[in-house]
């Protein structure tokens, strides 16, 4: 069983959010369920299932999520970083099935990646690997320039609204997406120098507007020092809207 329901209330207390997650599971619960996989936008101890310092949920500083859910549903529960779930979903069920090495890069209100090396997830300590958005860049860090907040700041509207304007021919909106593509090109260069994956799969809400920043991104990528690595790289967008949910489910179904 794989399903997605609603967003959690980010500003609510720890207990209220746990209740919302629990109630969401109950809505789709079936006695045939063998386990529950959960992806969270933060660092995680996958062994204990403890979630730490969720940046967009202030009340979640140290939450024993795995134990809480297991105590209620009495099935196996696996917890991991949501970008890792995205990368695993693509590896197991999506466009990464033929790739030994890949990066799943999720671009939304923030930006983060999941890393697959030699057909296995590389999560690092507390699932902290892949936080490419926190790498220093210019006067801030990559997330400042390579996520939805860039469009809000530079265009005054959401990335989705700016994309609509750009597709209607708005020159200012097009220019913002060109700038975004330049910043994305620099971020992907950093990823290539560190990991040299054969494929990068883009997901998240901003990836839906890939056609608007692809050209500028590749123009910046042309400055990459090692042409053979660049020639081997394939960059695609995810096709499955629930690939992260599939990846979370796969935490249980794939050993």
Image (cartoon, rainbow, N blue to C red):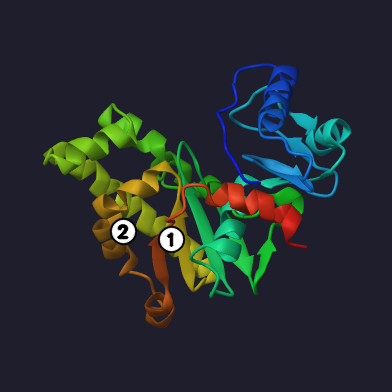
Q: Which residue is mark 2?
A: 217
Q: Is residue 194 left or right of residue 33?
A: left
Q: Is residue 57 visible?
A: yes
Front residue of 144/8: it is 8
Front residue of 80/125: it is 80
- Say which label, 1 or 2, has the lower sequence index: 1
Residues at circles 1 and 2 in contact by the CB criterion of under 8 Å: yes
Look at 67% across and 29% down and name the residue there: 27
Asked if 199 appears above or below 136 in the picture, the reply is below
How packed is label 2: few (under 14 Cα within 10 Å), some, or many (20 or more)? many
Displayed quadrant of residue 219: bottom left
Front residue of 2/225: it is 2
Circle on res. 188: 1
Q: Secondary structure at mark 1?
A: helix
Q: Position of residue 164 (x, y in %)?
A: 22, 37
Look at 72% across and 54% down and name the residue there: 251
Q: Is residue 131 visible?
A: no
Q: Position of residue 116 (x, y in %)?
A: 61, 65
Q: How many marks?
A: 2
Q: Position of residue 14 (x, y in %)?
A: 73, 21
Q: Position of residue 101 (x, y in %)?
A: 57, 72
How packed is label 1: few (under 14 Cα within 10 Å), some, or many (20 or more)? many
Displayed quadrant of residue 11: top right
Q: Is residue 226 left or right of residue 75?
A: left
Circle on res. 113: none
State the quadrant of the C terminus.
bottom right
Asked if 28 appears above or below 175 in the picture, the reply is above
In the picture as drawn, the residue positioned furthest to the bottom comes out as 228
Q: Is residue 74 left or right of residue 135?
A: right
Q: Is residue 90 left or right of residue 171?
A: right
Asked if 48 appears above or below 60 in the picture, the reply is below
């Amino acid at each position: 069983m794989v399903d997605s329901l609603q967003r959690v209330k980010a500003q609510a207390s720890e207990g209220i959010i746990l209740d919302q997650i629990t109630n969401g599971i109950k809505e789709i619960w079936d006695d045939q369920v063998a386990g529950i996989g959960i992806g969270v936008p933060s660092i995680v101890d996958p062994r204990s299932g403890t979630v730490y310092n969720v940046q967009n949920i202030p009340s979640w500083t140290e939450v024993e999520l795995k134990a809480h859910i297991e105590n209620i549903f009495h099935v196996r529960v696996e917890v991991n970083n949501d970008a890792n779930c995205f990368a695993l979903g693509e590896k197991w069920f999506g466009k990464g099935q033929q790739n030994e090495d890949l990066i799943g890069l999720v671009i939304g209100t923030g930006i983060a990646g999941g890393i697959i090396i030699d057909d296995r997830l590389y999560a690092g300590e507390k699932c902290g690997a892949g936080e490419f958005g926190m790498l220093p860049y210019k006067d801030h860090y990559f997330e400042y320039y390579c996520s939805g907040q860039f469009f809000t700041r530079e265009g005054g509207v959401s990335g989705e609204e700016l994309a609509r304007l750009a597709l209607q021919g708005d020159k200012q909106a097009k220019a913002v997406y060109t700038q975004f593509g330049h910043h994305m090109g620099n971020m992907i260069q950093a990823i290539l120098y560190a990991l040299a994956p054969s494929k990068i799969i883009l997901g998240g809400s901003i990836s839906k507007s890939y056609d608007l920043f692809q050209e500028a991104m590749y123009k910046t990528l042309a400055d990459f020092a090692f042409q053979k690595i660049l020639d081997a790289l394939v960059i695609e967008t995810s096709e499955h809207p629930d690939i992260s949910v599939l990846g979370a489910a796969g935490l249980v179904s794939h050993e």
